[in-house]
Amino acid sequence: MIHAKNGTEVLENLTPVVSPGSGVEHWGASYFGPRYSTSARASGQNSPQALMTQMCANETILPHFHGVAQFQIFPAGAGMMGKSEVRSLALQYKDHHSAYGPLVAGPHGLTFIALRNRTGDSAPVYLGKPGYREKLKPSKRRNWVSPHIALSTRPVLQHRKDVSWEPIFEQEIKDEMSAQVVRLGAGMSATAPDPKGGGGYYIFVCNGSLQMPGESLPAWSMVFVEPGESAFEIKAGQIGLEALVMQFAFDDD
């Protein structure tokens, strides 16, 4: 199955959400799936889960981990993750049961979008709360944050003559996980990776638009291609397209 969500619709449906770790009220919306699940055998556990969070100015989210692997996009605002600066556009990859944080928003807020290829036991487990050690499981413990990802101006993007695939992470990747930015001029197309070669992948529209049958998806829209599908054709709209393509490894629980 292919899941698609218009980013404008998600932004228009932001609602107040209380952070389970700090008690601070910020804003959230869902692309796919529930906001949290605390069971590895939850209903819809094999369905994608993609969630947007808009942090308040100077808000802090304490160190924590999740029971499933995730990509995390930072499309707006700025802040700090531990001792590293995070600013748009940036991408994080984090293995399951791998702690990260604290995540601290700057004076103008910070937006992040968490992407999981399945729901599973995805609720955050905070390192400052009793019992977290009992919930830890073996993991590769990768917690990678990309360098800044530059986006094109409108005329440069629109008049591109070639397709460009650019790997995002500088570290060596030894499994099926991959993360790339694809850049397409107006009306151009490219074939995304074979979904059967990993655990499915997300496509996030960073700039321009993505053409779907009967629909044009604007910036901040999302597509998830399940592992059983055929390779997805990425087609740019009238002003071109820059998109993140993020493939998960096969499950390694």
Image (cartoon, rainbow, N blue to C red):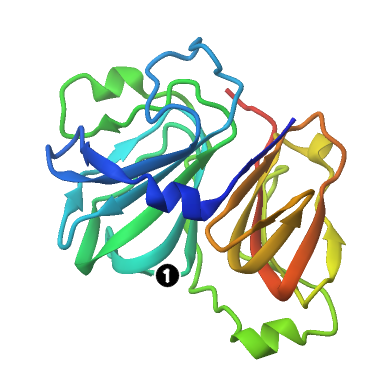
Residue 143 appears in view? no
Question: In terms of secondary structure, where does tag 1 sit?
Answer: loop
Give the quarter of the image for residue 83. bottom left
Q: Position of residue 134 (x, y in %)?
A: 30, 17
Q: Position of residue 46 (x, y in %)?
A: 61, 21
Q: Which residue is mark 1?
A: 88
Residue 233 appears in view? yes
* In the rendered image, the vertical position of residue 52 relative to residue 181, given as above or below: above
Query: At 51% from the left edge and 65% from the top edge, which residue is drawn?
Result: 146
Q: How many marks?
A: 1
Q: Residues within 10 Å of mark 1 (few under 14, many from 20)?
A: some
> Quick one: 215 or 4, which is closer to the camera?
215
* In the rendered image, the vertical position of residue 101 relative to residue 128, given as above or below: below
Q: Quadrant of the N terminus?
A: top right
* In the rendered image, the vertical position of residue 63 relative to residue 104, given as above or below: above
Give the quarter of the image for residue 169. bottom right
Q: Position of residue 12 (x, y in %)?
A: 39, 51
- Could you tell whether 166 is left or right of 127 in the image? right
Q: Position of residue 71 (x, y in %)?
A: 52, 47
**Type of the residue with mark 1:** Ser
Q: Quadrant of the C terminus?
A: top right
Query: At 13% from the left edge and 43% from the top edge, which residue is drawn?
Result: 24
> Quick one: 231 or 98, which is closer to the camera?
231
> Quick one: 185 or 166, which is closer to the camera?
185
- Could you tell whether 122 is left or right of 95 in the image? left
Residue lying at the far left in this picture: please name it.
Answer: 23
Query: At 48% from the left edge and 33% from the top edge, which residue is drawn?
Result: 96
* In the rendered image, the vertical position of residue 10 relative to residue 218, given as above or below: above
